[in-house]
């Protein structure tokens, strides 16, 4: 494998190990939860407790994207890097029986855990898909909302992830994600060390970089809101954007 392939596989294996721990009753702790000084990481970001315990234990995010996703009955929602399935299960409740909640994950162990959690919760309007967030296995324009919880920072090709997100969103579709972002002008060595401590081994974007990438793709109403401090110069944030209702399903170039 090439070096990028090795790094991606290492990330998948790390989260597979955390899924196995959650499935056997353990409580995984990702590095971000160790370094954060507030309650925005992991299950602490959620008020819901009436979900399978293993789904809560496996919550390894840096926020709660559902707090801003404004999901509506009948919508289709996709969770990038769905982990143990918590956000998918909560999304499924919000979109109701006429809606659909998809989860995408590259770890077979996480998918097995999520499917077990969905079965325990009796959720029949969910579907968990195997794949990579750089190549989403859904047709263009097929979902109304894309959410993600501290996963895009794990990708080695973040522009491609955002481009794929744009592709699968229907015109007028909405993006609501939690992620870790870096301050502008942060010393590269300080930034790299903080990223390693938080668990963002493949780097982070700044708010300016996020905004530029989203706008180049054609997203509008881009809004980035800091929600907590993760480490030196790193912050958890909510990133919101909308695909124009006039957008064609084809992907613009120039990313």
Image (tube, grey):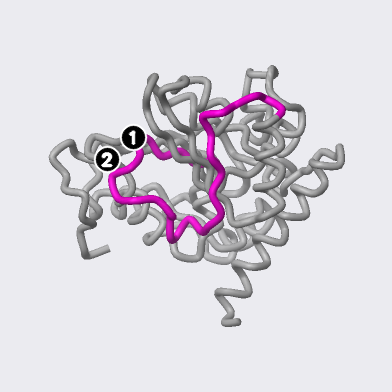
Which quarter of the figure has residue 115?
top right
Q: Position of residue 32 (x, y in %)?
A: 67, 45
Q: Nearer the viewer, residue 211 or 48?
A: 48
Q: Secondary structure at mark 1?
A: strand
Q: Nearer the viewer, residue 192 or 13?
A: 13
N-terminal label among 1 and 2: 1
Toward which corner of the image does residue 22 lie, by quadrant? Answer: top right
Residue shown at the point (41%, 35%) measured from the top left: 176
Q: Residue at x 80, y 42 (%)?
A: 23
Residue 169: give x, y in percent of width and height. 31, 43
For disc 2, the marked residue is: 170
Q: Give SS at disc 2.
A: strand
Which residue is most to the right?
25
Magenta range is 120-149
| 223 sits to left or right of 236 | left
Q: Furthest-bottom residue in view?
A: 2
Q: Which residue is mark 1?
A: 144
Q: Is residue 124 magenta?
A: yes
Mark 1 to mark 2 CA distance (whole Å): 6 Å
Picture coordinates of residue 209, whole percent (x, y):
36, 54
User: For the C terminus, which image quadrant?
Assistant: bottom left
The residue under the point 62% across, 32% down is 86
């Amino acid at each position: 494998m090439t070096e990028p392939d090795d790094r991606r596989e290492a990330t998948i294996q790390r989260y597979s190990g955390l899924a196995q721990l959650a499935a056997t009753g353990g409580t995984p702790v990702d590095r971000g939860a160790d370094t954060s000084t507030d309650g925005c990481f992991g299950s602490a970001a959620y008020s819901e407790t009436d979900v399978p315990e293993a789904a809560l234990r496996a919550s390894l995010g840096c926020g709660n994207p559902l707090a801003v996703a404004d999901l509506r009955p009948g919508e289709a929602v996709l969770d990038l890097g769905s982990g143990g399935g918590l956000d998918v299960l909560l999304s499924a409740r919000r979109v109701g029986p006429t809606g659909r909640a998809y989860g995408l994950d590259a770890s077979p162990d996480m998918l097995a855990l999520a499917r077990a959690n969905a079965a325990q919760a009796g959720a029949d309007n969910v579907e968990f898909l195997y794949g990579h967030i750089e190549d989403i296995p859904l047709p263009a324009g097929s979902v109304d909302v894309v959410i993600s919880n501290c996963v895009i920072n794990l990708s080695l090709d973040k522009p491609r992830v955002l481009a794929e997100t744009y592709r699968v969103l229907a015109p007028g579709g909405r993006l609501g994600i939690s992620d870790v972002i870096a301050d502008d002008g942060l010393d590269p060595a300080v930034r790299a060390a903080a990223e390693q401590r938080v668990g963002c081994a493949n780097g982070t974007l700044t708010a300016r970089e996020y905004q530029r990438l989203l706008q180049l793709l054609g997203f509008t109403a881009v809004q980035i809101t800091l929600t907590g401090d993760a480490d030196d110069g790193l912050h958890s944030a909510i990133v919101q954007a909308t695909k124009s209702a006039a957008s064609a399903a084809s992907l613009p170039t120039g990313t």
